[in-house]
Amino acid sequence: MAKSNLVRSEGWVHLQVFANTSDGVFAVDPEGRVVIWNKAATRILGFEADEALGRRCCDVMSGFDVSGNLLCYPGCQVMVLSARQQPIHHFDMRTRRKDGQEIWINISTIVVPGANDQASGTVHLFREVMHARPAPGRMRHHPESGGRQARERTPSGVVASSGSPGRNPAERLTSREREILRLVAGGLATSTIASKLCISQTTVRNHIQHILAKLGAHSRLEAVTFVFGQELFAPGLH
């Protein structure tokens, strides 16, 4: 595969599945260097891929939270949680475009473990928002609360996310649904999946709707990011 100018090196090509979206996407290595930068990131922030790749994430983004606290710095809270492979709740951040214009963006973060010769990375998907919203707290059940939920917050408004208690939603997927989700993650279109599995496109769409319902996802991209976050691609769905 030829190296894309959106990817720093061949070792990160496996993360490009996240780049084909209208959301801005950038990925960083364990040292916090940008290794993926998609076209939507350029559209939103103004930086071309060759201006972002190889630089420290904190130098490119230079973000602040709703209280004006610095979010982006070497060894930031996101990097700490990523190193622990701990899920991270989405959050709002104030940053500046290349032209100096101040904007607010909402960021979703997925920690992707390495598999075989593939390096581990942290993928950030972001979109512009009109204004900042209060950062949601981490929801946790406390036995002493009589079933009520309590909130926990990590420093700087970056929130560690705990999955809902009980069975992992991904375990509800059938073997066929897992197979289809793996193909979706590989970037295959509905028609291609149907041809590959010798089933109709309608059947593929029905399977995808069932997958989204079981995972509580609203789109194919959300389903793929959920599965990456649950380490079910290592290197493929089992």
Image (tube, rainbow, N blue to C red):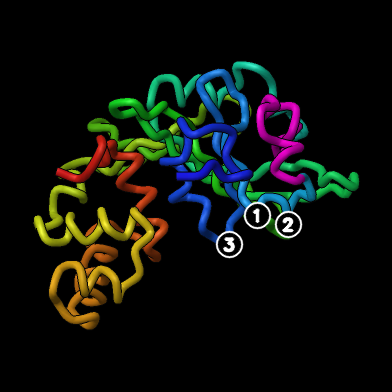
Q: Circle 3 — which element?
A: loop
Tell which circle, 3 or 2, labels the residue nearer the N-terminal end: 3
Q: Circle 1 — which element?
A: helix
Name the residue that disc number 1 marks: 39
Name the residue that disc number 3 marks: 22
As for residue 57 lying within the magenta part, the answer is yes
Q: Which residues are magenta?
A: 48-66
**Residue type (three-letter) at the residue carrying disc 1:** Lys
**Residue type (three-letter) at the residue carrying disc 2:** Arg
Q: Residue at x 31, y 60 (%)?
A: 184
Q: In this rendered view, identify the residue nearer to me: 212 or 29.
A: 29
**Residue type (three-letter) at the residue carrying disc 3:** Ser
Name the residue that disc number 2 marks: 43
Q: What whole-number distance in Å separates the C-alpha atoms at marks 3 and 2?
A: 10 Å
Direction from residue 156 to residue 29 in the image, left or right: left
Outermost residue to the front: 2
Q: In this rendered view, identify the residue nearer to me: 165 or 180.
A: 180
Q: Image height check: is 107 above or below 131?
A: above
Judge the density around disc 2: few (<14), some (14-19), many (≥20) Cα neighbours within 10 Å: some
Judge the density around disc 3: few (<14), some (14-19), many (≥20) Cα neighbours within 10 Å: some
Residue 211 x %, y %: 23, 63
Q: Residue at x 34, y 63 (%)?
A: 188
